[in-house]
Amino acid sequence: MYADRAVLLVRFVEERGVPAEEVWEVTAERPDFDFMWLYEEARSLATPEGAHRPSVVDVRANRTDWGGDSGTFEVALTVSKWVLDQGATAAFGYAFSECVSRMRTGPTAGLEGTHLSRQEATERARWKVAAAYKIDADRLSITSEEISGDSWTIGLADAGQATYEVTLAQEEGLVVTTRIKRTLDPGTAAAS
């Protein structure tokens, strides 16, 4: 299968069908690995050393042949947020970072990396939150922004519903990792 982009998406949820409290994502351009490897990595994140974590693994592949030729392979892991609550964050984070490292080893010949500008970072943060939580990006207002090296941390608010802390990190201007932390406003949390 051909794909010029591979995505690993991890959502931490309280229970199935509820929006994620936290989302981790890595996107690799021009991936140079077997896509079944990415699927197996997602499965191993959900079941480390045989331990069971309530989870769902979804795989989606698409191909566009309409003028330009492109393809995307995406693996989405939805896992119980108790992984974060039970002190397993470090182990899960390490396993995720190992997966990210492997995704970063693809060929980048002919691709020129660029650093995210402030505008690109804020727009990408809005777009990532809108995609993850199925809300209109125009409803999101910027509450904070900070740059540190090749990483941006953008604070967003959704009109009294929730706040989001979005961290975008780049390597060589090509691979982007995203981490979204969602916090419901107290009045919203009581109502849900």
Image (spheres, grey):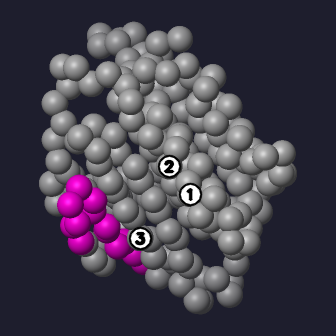
User: Where, quadrant-wise, is the C terminus in this rendering?
Assistant: bottom right
What amino acid type is highlighted by mark number 1? Answer: Gly
Label 2, label 3: how many angstroms apart (C-alpha)?
20 Å
Residue 157: x and y in percent read 40, 75
Horizontally, residue 154 falls left or right of residue 49, namely left
In this rendering, the answer to whether 188 lies above or below 76 is below
Residue 12: x and y in percent read 64, 60
Q: How crowded is mark 2: few (under 14 residues within 10 Å), some or many (20 or more)?
A: few
Mark 3 lies on a secondary structure that is strand
Task: Find disc 3 in the rendering and name its residue.
Answer: 165
Which range is magenta? Answer: 146-159
Task: Find disc 2 in the rendering and name its residue.
Answer: 97
Task: Find disc 1 in the rendering and name its residue.
Answer: 93
- The residue closer to the viewer here, 62 or 167, is 167
Residue at point 54%, 33% (across, down):
74
Label 1, label 2: how many angstroms apart (C-alpha)?
6 Å
